[in-house]
Image: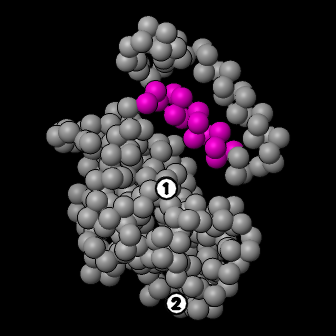
């Protein structure tokens, strides 16, 4: 488990609608609009990007936990009021999703801690994280079809890659809500926990990752991402190249020497 909070070392948004906190090795970012079930409006996304990028740039942060305030929702979706009157031309000109690409560019591993609703953009935000710790009361879904649109933040792509074409089609074309237990069975959720343990469990998982050799963690994340973004042969080649390159790191030498010496390794992050 995480120990006492360290002094915050980076400039993080401290006001609504997003708060940030840096603990030993682990950043915690909270979307804090419980009165609207943490819906994502433009300001919220901008502050979320700022918090994630600040932590991503902080050398002492080796894993990030992302959650929503309150017990009812992780993120219940995008702010429909901001989008309702747009046209195709104005949507392209306004570029409301430009910040989203910056979220997916965060290199530090991210764990979504999900309680309650993760719908629409909230589901896509969870899918954009590397792992999902979900409460047994969590509910996932892509209900955009009921608004006459489709997911626009990667839902069609990441969902199909994770659970397969047929199940992704069913969820997206019907807008059906997915209980946490079913999401866990489908492989959308890494760990399923009692509701009250959601954030502590996510912080515990993040602490495990933060304690691992950071260069190897970064290489593993890149290699796994490659598996979803290109042909198998290219992913295998990228994995092999990263595997070889790690043998030029101090952490590889330390890890294998510690194993041989039957002691705990001390990671240097280089």
Please name the residue shown 28% across and 53% down the image: 200
Q: Judging from the image, what secondary structure is the residue with disc 2 in?
A: loop
Which label lies toward us, 2 or 1?
1
Residue 60 lies, with reference to residue 227, above or below; the image says above
- Distance, label 2 to label 1, CA atoms, is 34 Å
Q: Position of residue 108 (x, y in %)?
A: 47, 42
What stretch of residues is rendered in magenta?
212-226
Residue 258 showing in the rendered view: yes
In this rendering, position of residue 3 left or right of residue 82 = left
Q: Residue at point 43% right, 30% down?
A: 212
Q: Is residue 217 magenta?
A: yes
Residue assigned mark 2: 84
Residue 107: give x, y in percent of width and height. 51, 43
Q: For the residue carrying disc 2, how many other residues have a C-alpha within 10 Å: few (<14), some (14-19), or many (20+)?
A: few
Q: Nearer the viewer, residue 193 or 140?
A: 193
- Using residue 11 as the reference point, say whether residue 45 is left or right of it: right
Mark 1 residue crowding within 10 angstroms, few (<14) / some (14–19) / many (20+): some
**Which quadrant would the N terminus be assigned to in this image?**
top left
In the image, 176: left or right of 67? right
Q: Nearer the viewer, residue 98 or 196?
A: 196
Up/down of 228 relative to 6, above or below: below
Picture coordinates of residue 50, whole percent (x, y) = 39, 54
Residue 193, image quadrant: bottom left
């Amino acid at each position: 488990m995480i120990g006492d909070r360290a002094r915050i070392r980076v400039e993080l948004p401290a006001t609504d609608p997003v708060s940030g906190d840096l603990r030993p090795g682990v950043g915690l970012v909270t979307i804090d609009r419980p009165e609207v079930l943490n819906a994502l409006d433009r300001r919220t996304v901008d502050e979320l990007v700022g918090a994630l990028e600040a932590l991503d740039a902080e050398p002492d942060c080796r894993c990030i936990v992302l959650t929503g305030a309150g017990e009812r929702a992780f993120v219940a979706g995008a702010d429909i009021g901001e989008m309702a009157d747009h046209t195709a031309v104005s949507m392209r000109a306004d570029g409301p999703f430009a910040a989203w690409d910056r979220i997916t560019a965060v290199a530090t591993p991210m764990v979504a801690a999900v309680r309650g609703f993760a719908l629409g953009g909230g589901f896509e935000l969870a899918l954009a994280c590397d792992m999902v710790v979900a409460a047994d009361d969590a509910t996932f879904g892509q209900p955009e079809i009921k608004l006459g649109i489709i997911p626009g933040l990667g839902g069609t792509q990441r969902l199909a890659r994770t659970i397969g074409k047929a199940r992704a089609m069913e969820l997206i074309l019907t807008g059906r809500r997915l209980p946490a237990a079913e999401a866990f069975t489908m492989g959308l959720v890494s760990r399923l926990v009692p509701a009250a343990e959601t954030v502590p469990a996510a912080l515990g998982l993040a602490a495990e990752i933060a304690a691992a050799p950071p260069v190897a963690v970064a290489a593993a994340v890149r290699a796994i991402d490659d598996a979803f973004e290109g042909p198998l042969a290219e992913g295998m080649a990228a994995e092999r190249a990263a595997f070889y390159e790690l043998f030029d790191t101090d952490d590889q030498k330390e890890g294998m020497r510690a194993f041989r010496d039957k002691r705990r390794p001390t990671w240097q992050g280089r």
